[in-house]
């Protein structure tokens, strides 16, 4: 796991992408500079949508990243920017994945 590797490797984009393809929860353990990279974040949310909670705000407002996260894990709608609450594509993706996630999350907005 990337959590236990040297800091120099945590700052390597190729190493980070490889780790995130295996486990999206590795995102908090890569360096902040790597965590700002859109490709890295997209890889992480495609593997595990919950990691949207570890993403910077700039990624939580990125529609493509939000859609990838919600398609992987409908409960990720808790962590997306509020403006997507009214986005039909995002909410439909969540609804088809898990209708209960949509109902519960609308109570949180």
Image: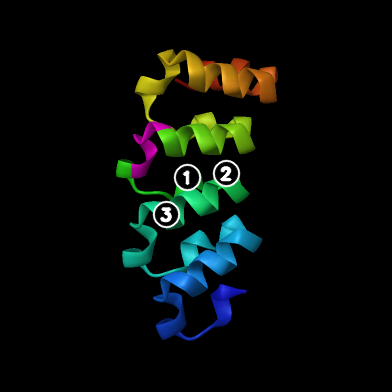
Q: Position of residue 88 (x, y in %)?
A: 48, 13
Which mark lies nearer to you, 2 or 3? Answer: 3
First in residue order: circle 2 vs circle 3: 3
Which mark lies nearer to you, 1 or 3? Answer: 3
First in residue order: circle 1 vs circle 3: 3
State which quarter of the image contains the N terminus. bottom right
Q: Pointer 1 and pointer 2: residues touching (CB < 8 Å)?
A: yes
Q: What residue is pinned by disc 1?
A: 53
Please give the name of the residue rendered at 57% of the width and 16% of the height, measured from the top-left corner. 92
Classify residue 51 as left or right of residue 31: right
Say which element carries label 1: helix
Please report the bounds of the magenta region as a residue range: 59-63
Q: What residue is pinned by disc 2?
A: 50
Please tell me whether the stretch drawn in magenta is mainly helix, strand or loop.
Answer: helix
Disc 2 versus disc 3: distance between alpha carbons? 17 Å
Q: What residue is pinned by disc 3?
A: 39
Above or below for 35 versus 86:
below
Say which element carries label 3: helix
Disc 1 versus disc 3: distance between alpha carbons? 16 Å
């Amino acid at each position: 796991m990337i959590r236990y590797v040297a800091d120099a490797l945590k700052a390597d984009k190729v190493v980070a992408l490889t780790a995130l393809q295996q486990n999206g929860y590795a995102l908090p353990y890569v360096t902040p500079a790597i965590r700002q990279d859109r490709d890295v974040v997209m890889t992480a949310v495609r593997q595990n949508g919950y990691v949207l909670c570890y993403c910077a705000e700039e990624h939580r407002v990125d529609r493509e990243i939000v859609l990838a996260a919600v398609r992987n894990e409908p409960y990720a709608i808790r962590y997306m920017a509020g403006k997507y609450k009214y986005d039909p594509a995002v909410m439909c993706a969540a609804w088809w994945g898990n209708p209960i996630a949509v109902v519960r999350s609308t109570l949180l907005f």
